[in-house]
């Protein structure tokens, strides 16, 4: 393991980070920034060239995620943050390039400090790609999708790769910036709904995505599939409604807390890694950990 990776989290949780199941199918590499563009006041798009040994086909899957390995000056260690690859492409000359959208947020953090200094030529270590979950599409069921701005890049890849002719879908998107919403391209049969959030309303507090999920559910009692990404507590409410109130199977409800209001990403990562360490005391394998099993 390289020295950069050994410095992650100050050397804590190495048993988890080095576990074969954690590293299966993913490789270290480097992305070098070529452009930084403000897509909207809340979103910055980082374009970078890729120096990575992984199979190119792994970058073309739906909803691929990478971890950026960044310095945390406050803890004198490295931290990692997960982001969706919004787009991946290769030039005729063999240059590989990707786009990563980063949501600006209030407060100080390793990502915001890195983003403030990001400019062409800056390189950052990455780990990935790892395909993340997509709607469990069934031809006879509508697919419902719910996303705040942190999940828009993932939603964009899902819509891009929609290959189910005749399958209906609806997506509800909460973001303060219409430009971010209008970038989304809806395939035939999929309706997009913008849930605008005034800039004076903090993200993760409005309940609009939860309300949209409950309203859609009350108006349509037939079987559906669900995918959602956003603030942890709001996503928990959506998940609990479909899993418990409607009795849907876990495989039919792919819901993820991309961030948690009132907690830093470092705190969330620590809680998740600690849970994995506890689980490895009882099993040699790392079973996927439900995001909502982490009670931090």
Image (tube, rainbow, N blue to C red):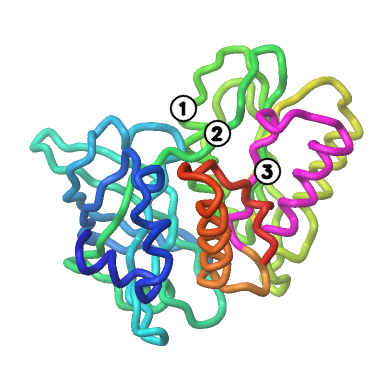
Q: Which residues are magenta?
A: 232-259
| Helix, strand or loop status at disc 2 | loop
Q: Please indicate whether residue 65 sits to the left or right of residue 242 in the image.
A: left
Work out whether 112 lies above or below 50. below
Residue projecting furthest to the left:
93
Q: Label 2: which residue?
A: 134
Q: Label 1: which residue?
A: 161
Compare residues 50 and 133 and report the one nearer the observer: 133
Task: Inspect the magenta stretch and tell me whether residue 257 lies in it.
Answer: yes
Work out whether 167 lies above or below 62. above
Circle nearer the viewer, 2 or 3:
2
User: At x 48% / y 40%, what residue is drawn?
Assistant: 132
User: At x 37% / y 76%, what residue is drawn?
Assistant: 10
Q: Residues within 10 Å of mark 3 (few under 14, many from 20)?
A: many
Q: Are marks 3 and 1 in contact (CB under 8 Å)?
A: no
Label drawn at residue 146: 3
Q: Position of residue 167 (x, y in %)?
A: 64, 17
User: At x 56% / y 13%, what residue is drawn?
Assistant: 165
């Amino acid at each position: 393991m390289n020295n950069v990776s050994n410095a992650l989290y100050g050397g804590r949780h190495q048993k988890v980070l080095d576990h074969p199941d954690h590293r299966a199918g993913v490789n270290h590499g480097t992305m070098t920034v070529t452009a930084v563009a403000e897509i909207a006041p809340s979103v910055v798009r980082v374009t970078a060239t890729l120096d990575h040994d992984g199979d190119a086909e792994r970058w073309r899957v739906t909803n691929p995620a990478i971890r950026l390995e960044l310095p945390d000056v406050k803890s004198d260690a490295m931290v990692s943050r997960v982001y969706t690859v919004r787009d991946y492409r290769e030039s005729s000359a063999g240059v590989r390039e990707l786009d990563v959208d980063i949501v600006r947020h209030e407060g100080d953090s390793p990502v915001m400090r890195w983003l403030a200094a990001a400019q062409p030529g800056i390189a950052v270590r990455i780990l990935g790609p790892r395909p993340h979950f997509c709607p469990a599409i069934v031809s006879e069921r509508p697919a419902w999708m719910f996303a705040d701005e942190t999940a828009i890049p993932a939603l964009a890849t899902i819509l891009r790769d929609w290959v189910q002719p005749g399958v209906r879908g609806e997506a509800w998107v909460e973001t303060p910036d219409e430009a971010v919403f209008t970038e989304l391209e809806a395939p035939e049969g999929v309706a997009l709904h913008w849930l605008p959030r005034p800039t004076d309303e903090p993200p993760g507090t409005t309940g609009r995505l939860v309300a949209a999920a409950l309203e859609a559910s009350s108006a349509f009692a037939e079987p559906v599939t669900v995918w959602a990404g956003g603030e942890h507590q709001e996503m928990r409410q959506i998940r609990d409604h479909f899993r418990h109130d409607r009795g849907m199977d876990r495989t039919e409800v792919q819901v993820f807390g991309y961030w948690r209001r009132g907690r830093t990403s470092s705190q969330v990562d620590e809680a998740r890694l600690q849970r994995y360490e506890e689980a490895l005391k009882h099993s040699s394998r790392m079973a996927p950990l439900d995001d909502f099993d982490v009670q931090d």
